[in-house]
Amino acid sequence: MNQSKSHRLIVFDTETTGMNDSGGPIYQGHRVIEIGCVEVIDRKLTGNTFHVYINPEQLIDEEAIQVHGITDEFVADKPLFRDVAHDFVEFIRGGELVAHNANFDISFLDHEFEMMSRTLAQAMPKCADICTITDSLLVARRGEYNKREVQMAGNKPLPSRKNLDSLSDYYGVDRTSRTYHGALLDAELLADVFLKMTGGQNKLNLKQKGSGDGVGVRLIDSNRAPLKVVFATEQELSEHQERLDLVEKKGGQCRWRN
């Protein structure tokens, strides 16, 4: 018997020492200090997580500490990125990575892998080499995921701001425990938001009449000729009743009998 392959999502977030805002890559001069992942299989949270704090071997910007609350003292005794990298790679391998503004998190992680490759002369993959990547921010902006429309909360349009706080409030996801931005907490929030957001119906590909390739739903001219109705003949009706009689005789009842 053929069984469909389970769909595995890894919803994740990172926290960093800061970000570069003086030109060049956003990760330039900065490091990852926390990774948080939650696993979702076939749209159900499994309870399986990956969470680690990392010693960045450099100071954390004060502005970043105000956001996530992670201090230099806290990460001083934590493992280095190279000590947790292989476990992280194995956790995400083959899944669909989901992050909000994914380019930020992915660029930092790929930079860490690149530095690790140079330092240890050990080739490390980029995230896109071992899994697919989905940006939930782009999903919210486009209103579509895998050719399905995003789910609306009632008849309310999506909020104009598509950050995690706004989307959590829109979908009724509790974020009262979110005093600071933490990677695992944000990943858990995003998982709830993403599952609610992507629970919509198949996107209808409505085509205007004469629009070309015939794919999707074709609009029909309102002035078209009425459909022809074909009625059963007397012989067909008789044969139908005989079939129902046979069903009733063998099964004791016939639910198709008028």
Image (cartoon, rainbow, N blue to C red):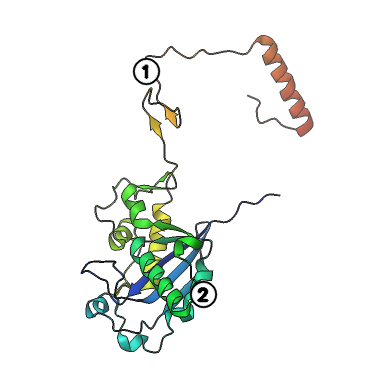
Q: Are marks 1 and 2 in contact (CB under 8 Å)?
A: no
Q: Which residue is at a point 45% across and 64% down the rendered structure image?
A: 127
Q: Quadrant of the C terminus?
A: top right
Give the labeled residue for mark 1: 222
Q: Residue at x 66, y 31 (%)?
A: 255
- The disc, 1 or 2, on the residue closer to the chain's N-terminal end is 2
- Find residue 222 and report its horizontal and vertical position in percent: 37, 18
The amino acid on which the numbered mark 2 sits, given as a three-letter code, is His
Give the quadrant of residue 188: bottom left
Residue sitting at 48 percent across and 67 percent down? 125
Nearer to the camera, 236 or 67: 67
Give the amino acid type for the residue marked by disc 1 in the picture: Ser
Identity of the residue furthest to the left in this view: 22
- Residue 58 in the image, given as x and y percentages of width and height: 31, 84
Say whether residue 140 is left or right of residue 62: right
Mark 1, secondary structure of its residue: loop
- Pointer 2: what residue? 86
Query: Looking at the picture, does residue 245 appear above or below residue 225?
Result: below
Residue 26 at x, y percent in the picture:
28, 67
Q: Secondary structure at mark 2?
A: helix
Evaluate whether residue 3 shows in this view. yes
